Image (spheres, rainbow, N blue to C red):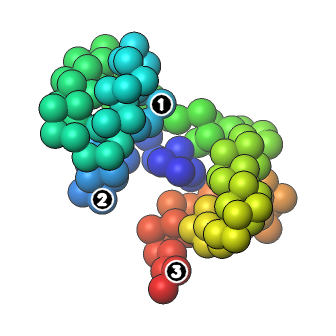
Amino acid sequence: MKGFGRRTRGAVFKRPASETLHKSGVEASAQHRPPETIARAGEGDETAMRVCDERRFKDGNRTSSEQRPSMGQDVQKGRRTEIEFLNGFVVREGAKIGLSCAANAVLTDLVKRVERNELSPDPRHITELRLN
């Protein structure tokens, strides 16, 4: 959900929580790495995480901090997002095996409400979110 609202790539990476999440090595920029390395990084393998981090930081130097993730672009331009195919999918698959996936359900609902103009795009919808 880092693309939600009006934040640019540079602004998102300045936030400590997103820096922690970003270190998992399992996001869209994980391209050009063997799937096994990405999976091990997601499981916390230090060596695999280092490989993913090195590539991500190298790739980061080729992009602008003013870039906006695709979902942020969609929201900014008033287009329908891919939220239903991402977080909504997680909610539906979780329900099949008895998991509630509350965070994904709330995020999906928030983005759909923004799409319907019931909420204005604002990162506080997510940063102020409390699920417990």
3D distance between C-alphas at marks 1 and 3? 25 Å
Q: Name the residue beneath numbered marker 3.
A: 131
Residue under numbered circle 2: 17
The x and y percentages for residue 20 are 26, 52
Q: Is residue 23 above or below residue 114?
A: above
Q: Are marks 1 and 3 in contact (CB under 8 Å)?
A: no
Q: Residue at x 33, y 51 (%)?
A: 21
Residue 121 position within the rendered picture, expressed as x and y whole percent measured from the top left:
63, 58
Q: Which of these two is toward me, 65 or 37? A: 37
Residue under circle 1? Answer: 28
Mark 1 secondary-structure assignment: helix
Q: Amino acid at mark 3?
A: Leu
Q: Secondary structure at mark 2?
A: helix
**Measured along the vertical axis of the image, is residue 43 above or below residue 128?**
above
Q: At numbered mark 3, what does the secondary structure look like: helix, strand or loop?
A: loop
Identify the residue shown where x is 60% and y is 33%.
70
Q: Is residue 65 above or below residue 78?
A: above
Circle 1: residue type: Ala
- The three-letter code of the residue at mark 2 reads Ala
Q: How many angstroms separate mark 2 from mark 3 (CA)?
A: 16 Å
Q: Earlier in the sequence, mark 1 or mark 3?
A: 1
- Locate residue 37, reporting x and y percent: 32, 26
Q: Residues within 10 Å of mark 1 (few under 14, many from 20)?
A: few
The residue sitting at 42% across, 24% down in the picture is 35
Q: What is the spatial separation of the Cα atoms under label 2 and label 1, in whole angstroms?
A: 18 Å
**Contact (Cβ within 8 Å) of mark 2 with mark 3:** no
Q: Does the CB distance between marks 2 and 1 fall below 8 Å? A: no
